Image: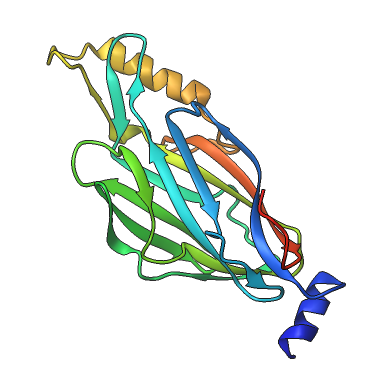
Amino acid sequence: MDSDNQAKEYNGATPGFWGIYPKASRSIDDDTYSFALTDNGQRSSAGNHVAVFLEVYFGASLHESGYSFGFTKARIRPSKSNITGCDIRFDESYNGSLIRPNSRASLIRTGMFGFIEMEALNNTLAGNYHFTIGPFFQIRPDSVPYELSYELKVQVSGINITKTDGSPLPSENKRAIIGCLLADDLSETKSANRWVTLCVQRSEIRSMAADDSRP
């Protein structure tokens, strides 16, 4: 099938382009935790794979008790493990790759299900992380619009809590911080291994004309 006919079949009308549009997002703290799946402005011809790039942000986390805390390990993964209605190709180059400023990223996958795991090289994850080695994955939906629903999760056992004056950490303070995280958990399904969801993002792959402007 040539590309023009393929585009007509997928869009049901005029050949065009596909791109990623944000639909909805939630975070337990918008100023501290965020991530985005984007196409980096790289439109794909309708019916072809769309490259999906990843950006993650961790800011300073403060608790009312006066302690700061952060996480040593995070995952960006689909909200559901059953991925259907598409052809998906993961970028295998994320294999312990260095992601500035202080993280290594690895792709963990089984069939069409895959996620990125980040691990801090020192202290905790902090700052802006741009995954520039390549796209997280490339996806071609069977039809559009097609929803992408992903979560930013952290491992509670990997929490690092400190106080600037170096004073010892009372166990009740650590319990209070973990309790707050568990209470704010945005996970649709709770994890037995204490992986807490900080953010959820829903985007859509949509068709658009060549002269459409991105919102």
Residue at the location (81% across, 70% down)? 11
User: Horizontally, is 162 left or right of 182 in the view?
Assistant: left
Image colouring: rainbow
Relative to 109, does residue 61 appear above or below in the rendering? above
Q: Quadrant of the N terminus?
A: bottom right
Which image quarter: residue 167? top left
At a point 65% along the width and 76% down the height, the residue shown is 48
Q: Quadrant of residue 179?
A: top left
Q: Is residue 175 above or below residue 49?
A: above
**Residue that appears at 29% across and 47% down:** 119
Which x, y percent locates residue 173? 30, 12
Could you tell whether 213 is left or right of 60 in the image?
right
Asked where in the image residue 170 lies, by quadrant, the reply is top left
Measured from the top left, where is residue 28 in percent x and y?
51, 27
Q: Nearer the viewer, residue 166 or 177?
A: 166
> In this view, which residue lies farthest toward the right?
13
Numbered circles on residues, count: 0
Q: Residue furthest bottom?
A: 1
Q: Where's residue 106, x and y in %?
A: 34, 59
Query: Which residue is outermost to the left?
Result: 166
What residue sits 72% from the left and 85% below the top? 3
Residue 105 horizontal side relative to residue 75, left or right: left
